[in-house]
Amino acid sequence: MEITTYFYDTYAFFEIIKGNRNYNKFSSGVAIVTTRLNLMELYYGLLVKFNKNIADKYYDELLKYIIDIDDETIKQAMVFRVLHKIKNLSYVDCVGYIIAKQRNIKFLTGDKEFKDLDNIEFVK
């Protein structure tokens, strides 16, 4: 059985942590790619919603899935952000989306701003 790889947006991590059943199939049996920037967003959100212990736990558990961001990816992500300026996408989301496209993997999110773009696994 082939394992599918997804780029996990911060949104996806939050939904999995919250127990959203629509994300159950993404909780195991898949390969995860993300960035330290996504973990930064997640950490902040968990600090606000829960506490430092919870934030530390998930941050530390998810570190094994991060990949580095190179300069060309940053440039492409900012071009993408400009092209979709009307959507007011975050810098972090744009970087993740470009990484997913570069690696030919789906960008997993429930962020409505990405719903109609290509290369998206949109789950609410």
Image: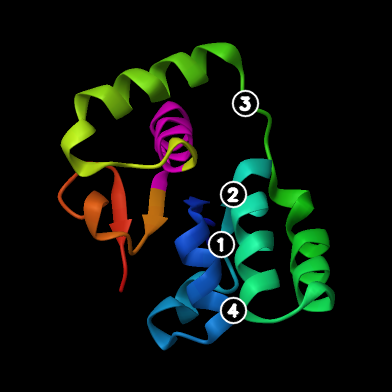
- Local crowd at mark 1 within 10 Å, few (<14), some, or many (≥20)? few
36 over 54 or under it: above or below: above
Residue 95 in magenta? yes
Q: Are marks 1 and 3 in contact (CB under 8 Å)?
A: no
Among the two numbered marks 3 and 2 on one chain, the one whose residue lies closer to the N terminus: 2
Q: Where does the image place residue 78, in percent across and percent down from the top left?
A: 39, 22
Mark seen at residue 17: 4
Q: Quadrant of residue 57?
A: bottom right
Magenta segment: does it hold 101? yes
Q: Amino acid at mark 4?
A: Ile
The colour scheme used to paint the residues is: rainbow
Q: Which residue is mark 3?
A: 69
Report which residue position mark 1 lands on: 30
Q: Is residue 108 left or right of residue 66?
A: left
The one nearer the camera, 91 or 108, is: 91
The answer to which of 45 and 26 lies nearer the viewer is 45
Residue 119, numbered label: none
Which residue is disc 2 drawn over? 38
Q: Are marks 1 and 2 in contact (CB under 8 Å)?
A: no
